[in-house]
Image: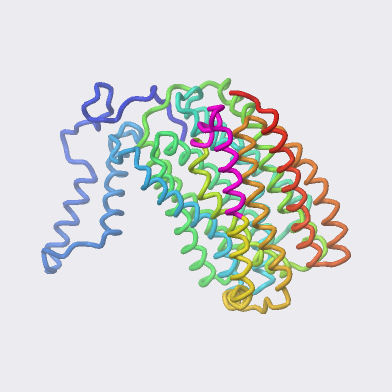
């Protein structure tokens, strides 16, 4: 929803420019609903001191607020009810939101495996891999640029328009890919559902970025939790009822759209001030400024996905399931490590900006890399102890033949976490073009390695290709970091 907003203003009730809910002479539908509930409660004969559950009260409150806003004729003119500047709350709910978001794909894959079998689950996993890659087009690397635009040099309306265009491009690329691959029937429907779900997720990201920009990151995390939890429940129920992965995928997309319209967009418009009028020049500027970040992030995602794409052309879809099953724990390392350092990136930038603190900056970089290595070794030990039997139990399949592949994937996951961290650090040093060149070299390497190894070694070849490219990319980024550190570019 594109809103015509005014410049930022304090939302405090005592502020001269604060927004206030228009006063009404007659009861609103929200008040009428509360009165109906009260009367219904009294006529049931139940105890008057019985209170509905916390979740029920929260849902009722949100519904009343939403209906009241619709009745008043504007979502954006409502008074904000949630305060900003809650660091602990931001950290908690952002971590929960990212955790739920990161766990959604693995959990859905497990559910699909148990309810539809390895082949169908493999098709779903492949479609989700493509959708995850396409989402980088929809997001276009804008989130960090948007939330750091504290002075609102570009209006929120411009960010919304940009995101709609980027997501339209994402859907178009997805459609062309399906046509080129010749997908039909079940696979085409599964791709339609997963692509739509990720496109809606990308649209939601610009609204959640607006909440973070106004220092209400915890609301962004709550929005993510609601969307992912709703999708998980509906996908599971749809699969149980229909026994159809394609229909469950479509239900997943519809549910995501409903949460966007009923929760994410209203929450953002309720809790943030109106944006000023946007112009197309701002949209073009966002495309131009974020292009380097988009290329780097898209290339990294493509590098991770190339072995899976090569497998699709040579091996059956159940191999996709096995590959992703041993890939998820490795990605868990990246997610965990990023949750530790990403909230501190602004602090790291401030440390780097002071020439007297450069040695301290280096020590922090070394400490994070060392911590990543230790955490990876810990994951490797746990995997060797109970990891394989636990994975077999979760999926209901025998993963013992994939023990060596799992070890390689865990180490690759640790290298992936270190790569992501080094990219962020090189960006802090304002020399991200060095990282982009490293990603280009790694992309060429993984493409050649995947075709060669998969055709010779099959499934194990895909794992070795992924492991090898992570090692190559890590070495390249260490070299580029040293170059950037020895020849700093001042702010």
Q: Nearer the viewer, residue 426 or 301?
A: 426
Q: Which of 327 and 112 is in front in this view?
A: 327
Q: What stretch is highlighted in magenta?
A: 347-372
Left or right position of 160 against 59: right
Identify whether 41 is placed above or below 303: below
The answer to whether one can see residue 255 in this image is yes
Q: Which residue is drawn at 46% across and 41% down?
A: 208
Left or right position of 422 against 147: right
Q: Which of 186 and 340 is in front in this view?
A: 340
x and y percentages locating residue 289 in the rendered image: 62, 27
Q: Quadrant of residue 245?
A: bottom right
Q: Please tell me whether the stretch drawn in magenta is mainly helix, strand or loop.
A: helix
Q: Quadrant of residue 190?
A: bottom right
Q: Reply yes or no: does residue 325 show up in magenta.
A: no
Q: Residue at x 17, y 41 (%)?
A: 27
Identify whether 4 is placed above or below 443: above
The answer to whether one can see residue 167 in this image is no
Q: How is the image coloured?
A: rainbow
Q: Nearer the viewer, residue 347 or 292?
A: 347
How many numbered marks appear?
Answer: 0
Q: Reply yes or no: does residue 350 show up in magenta.
A: yes
x and y percentages locating residue 258 in the rendered image: 45, 50
Please identify the quadrant where the C terminus is shown: top right
Q: Residue at x 85, y 57 (%)?
A: 451
Identify whether 481 is placed above or below 386: above
x and y percentages locating residue 135 in the rendered image: 62, 46
x and y percentages locating residue 177 in the rendered image: 74, 49
Q: In which quarter of the image is residue 430?
A: top right
């Amino acid at each position: 929803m594109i809103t015509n907003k005014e410049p930022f203003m304090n939302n405090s009730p005592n502020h001269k420019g604060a927004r206030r809910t228009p006063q009404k002479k007659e009861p609103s539908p929200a008040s009428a609903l509360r009165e109906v509930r009260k009367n219904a409660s009294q006529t049931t004969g139940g105890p008057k001191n019985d209170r509905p559950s916390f979740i029920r009260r929260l849902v009722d409150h949100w519904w009343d607020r939403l209906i009241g806003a619709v009745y008043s004729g504007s979502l954006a003119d409502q008074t904000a009810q949630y305060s900003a500047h809650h660091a602990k709350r931001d950290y908690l709910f952002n971590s929960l939101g990212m955790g739920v978001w990161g766990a959604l794909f693995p959990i859905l894959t497990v559910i699909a495996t148990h309810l539809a079998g390895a082949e169908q689950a493999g098709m779903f996993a492949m479609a989700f891999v493509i959708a995850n890659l396409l989402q980088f087009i929809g997001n276009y690397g804008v989130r960090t640029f948007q939330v750091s635009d504290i002075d609102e040099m570009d209006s929120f309306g411009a960010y919304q328009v940009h995101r709609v265009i980027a997501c339209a491009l994402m859907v178009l690329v997805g459609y062309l890919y399906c046509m080129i691959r010749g997908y039909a029937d079940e696979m085409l429907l599964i791709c339609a559902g997963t692509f739509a779900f990720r496109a809606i997720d990308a649209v939601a990201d610009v609204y959640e970025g607006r909440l973070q920009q106004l220092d209400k990151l915890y609301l962004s995390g709550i929005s993510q939790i609601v969307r992912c939890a709703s999708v998980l429940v509906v996908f599971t129920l749809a699969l149980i009822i229909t026994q159809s992965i394609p229909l469950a995928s479509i239900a997943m997309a519809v549910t995501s759209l409903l949460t966007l319209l009923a929760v994410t967009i209203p929450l953002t418009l309720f809790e943030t001030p109106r944006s000023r009028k946007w112009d197309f020049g701002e949209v073009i500027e966002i495309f131009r400024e974020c292009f380097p970040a988009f290329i780097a992030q898209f290339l990294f995602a493509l590098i991770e996905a190339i072995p899976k794409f090569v497998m699709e052309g040579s091996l059956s879809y159940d191999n996709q399931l096995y590959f992703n099953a041993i890939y998820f724990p490795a990605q868990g390392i990246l997610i965990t490590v990023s949750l530790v350092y990403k909230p501190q990136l602004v602090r790291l930038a401030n440390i780097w900006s002071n020439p007297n603190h450069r040695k301290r900056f280096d020590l922090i970089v070394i400490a994070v890399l060392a911590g990543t290595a230790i955490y990876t070794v810990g994951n490797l030990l746990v995997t060797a102890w109970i990891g394989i039997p636990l994975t077999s139990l979760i999926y209901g399949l025998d993963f013992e033949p994939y023990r060596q592949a799992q070890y390689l994937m865990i180490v690759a996951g640790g290298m992936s976490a270190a790569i992501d961290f080094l990219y962020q650090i090189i960006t802090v040093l304002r020399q991200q073009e060095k990282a982009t060149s490293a990603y280009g070299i790694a992309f060429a390497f993984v493409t050649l390695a995947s075709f060669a190894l998969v055709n010779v070694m099959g499934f194990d070849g895909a794992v070795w290709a992924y492991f090898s490219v992570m090692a190559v990319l890590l070495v390249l980024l260490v070299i580029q970091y040293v170059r950037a550190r020895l020849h700093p570019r001042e702010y």
